[in-house]
Image (spheres, rainbow, N blue to C red):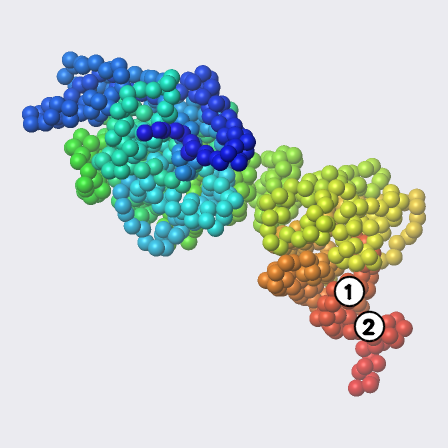
Amino acid sequence: MERSSRPPIVASNKNKDNAYKLNLLRSQPDEDWTRAIHHELNIKRRTCTTFIPSSSATNDSDRNANEVPCGCKRLRREHSWHISDGTDPRWRQEKHTKSAYNNAYGYIPNTYAHYIRCDIETQPSILAQLMYDVWKTKKPKLIMCIIGGAKYFKLSERLEREFIKGIIQAALRADGWIVTTGFKTGVVQLVGEAIHDHKVTNPRSHIVAIGCSKWGAAKNRASLILVDKKTATNPTQDATLGESKTFRGQRDLEPNHTHFLLLDDGTYYGYDIGDYRTRFVIEASHYKKEDVPVVTVVVEGGPNTLLTIYQDLSNNIPIVLIDGSGRVPNLLANFLNRTESMISRRGKDDSGVNWKAVIDIKQADDVEKLKTKFLVYADEIYDGLKDISKGSKISKEETDNLFKSFLYCLQPAIRSKIRIYSLDSGQNLNDTIFEAIVEAKQHKSLETNKAVDRKQLLRLALAWNAIQVAKDHIIKDDLNDISSQVKEQLFFEALLLDRPQFVNIFIKLNFDLAQMFYENKINQPWQLKWLQLKRLYENDANKSKERLYLLDKCCDKKQIISGGDLDLVLNKLIGDYVESIYTDTPMDFWRRLRICCQCQMGRVSDSREILYTDYNDNDSEVPDPIEAQNEAREFAYRDLFLWAILTNRIEMAKIIISHMQTRICSALIASKILKSYVSFAVDNESKEVLRSQAEQFEQYAIESLKCCYNYDEETACEIVVRRIYLFGGVSCLQVAVDADDKSFVGQPCCDQLLNNIWYDKMEPLESTLFERIKL
């Protein structure tokens, strides 16, 4: 049977040249892999060298000699060429296996997933280098291990839905890696189905799913072996694996995974790879001095799952238990909740044990401390361990090891690394995972006396959009210890990722937008840093794929590379009565800035409108530095508001307008732009959404105007008709009429203003008195 790491490409003579080019392009990566695998990384496989019959087979006298398996669970004919009979009474892996030339790597047929067979003695750092440098896997912001039940189990419909939603969102938002055992069974099959369902509805989306699997347990692994004269081995080796029959201790690889690390210990069947998965994710998280967060999510599972939890916790990997999924998570969550009240986290208890320090279970004395502390629950824990071990043949010694691992998880210094997700908690799985990562990072910083990297956690929070966890555990109403440069980077990411709540928190915590988008000039007006604003319009690749992103159509798919381009867009969407905002001459900019700086700023009820008055046109006068900075900040709000509306970041625009002082005009400008966008929309649903958004901003302007009018009628009328140089010299009434905002124009304030204009600018008080007399 011909075996290849790639499916063959068949081409007719007519397309021979194209087929040759396609084969050339597709074979090039394999050539690179070959050089890297055999020379640079030196990744090998492991094979049995000595045939020693297994002890169970030698006791069966009626068994055919050709059917007697070796201690590695291969038959004699399934061994490699260089096989010898051993005289040792017992087969041992360290003595009777050796590393050999690697003969299995490439792409899995049909799924095109990357795979490699590798000696289990291979250093995990080498496989991390393979992932990053050879396979060019995107660097993650999160590595999420999912462990648990390896057999069929059933979750409630709601819990299954929340679990799938949580892991997919976590992987997407953090560009995360999902790491599993890689076999199509139990929780891994559920994860694979979740990835498949996501791909169906989002074909452009890509989730990295890595299977750390045992080579000897992979069904049909013979199809993964390369056929080459240099690497050829015994033709019958692995031949039985081409059959469709499934033997005990082997499974199909899950087809929705993107990468497989097939660990070879020289044996067949069974799934045990020890702690290799734990060591691999740790190496991958610290590759090239990175510090990528790692978390393990536990769904159902039996004795082996509990041992894996112990391995991860002892390596400072936080755990998230899915309470209600069955067996281990249920049992551990139950006792974590029940023992919470008896734990003293402040120091030593009555027995003199310091519970702030981790008590390991490798020393008998330490185990006794834990047993004494939780003695009252010992019998219940043992009974629970027996229940989760049903169907597994475990000895008394193995049960005792499970008991010690269980006690290890209950101690105070460890339980802070464990989070419990429950449907009744009121928190989604996504936030629970992020909270586990944050608390683990903070706990580690306390242990090492090193400050936690808030920049990294905030970036992860931005990617995750975990605003509540960020407020409670990271920001804590204080950003003073973060440098201005880092805050600018985080704020910029919040804008591009469309995280309005994060933007709101930054502004409330006195992040200065003026310094970010405008340059301070001594005795001169602040000047716009156009490159900063340009970056916002240029780095919008993801947003531009959305249906309601219509800026490209408005610009005829031309990039906005200058202020003049942006002015043309605003003239097209608002009207040619808008004076240029971004292409002023220095004298024009000076004039407008002085107009703003000379104004009297006041608040009218809750509307916070700027009440501009006449100014003294004195060219020798320079703006007050504080007032100039305040106006530069208002310009920055305007720039961000226009950007948010033009790129259809509606919630972002609502947050920004709440910090502006020219709210009424801003809302009407938004209404006009959104109504103009209707003509560029391609379907009726999009048009209705845009009309609804425009109506929301018109209503916002109406409510703001009502507040002004109820507070001061005369000033409200002035606000409606005054020219707002911040938006190119337009007036609120002018924009409202042009936008056909009839509800706004029909407000009593506008009606009274029009009457005043009709009666040749009569004072509002006179008009009101005249109406009363007439009545």
Closer-to-camera residue (69/244)? 244
- Quadrant of the image occupied by residue 86: top left
Q: Position of residue 692 (x, y in %)?
A: 63, 64
- Amino acid type shown at disc 1: Asp
Please tell me which residue is depicted at 70% across the width and 71% down the height of the picture. 743
Tag 2 residue: 754
- Amino acid type shown at disc 2: Leu
Please tell me which residue is depicted at 81% across the width and 54% down the height of the picture. 728
Q: CA distance from mark 1 to mark 2?
A: 16 Å
Q: Secondary structure at mark 1?
A: helix
Q: Does 378 appear above or below 44?
A: below
Please tell me which residue is depicted at 69% across the width and 64% down the height of the picture. 698
Q: Are marks 1 and 2 in contact (CB under 8 Å)?
A: no
Camera-nearest label, 1 or 2: 1
Tag 1 residue: 738
- Quadrant of the image occupied by residue 357: top left
Q: Position of residue 384 (x, y in %)?
A: 21, 43
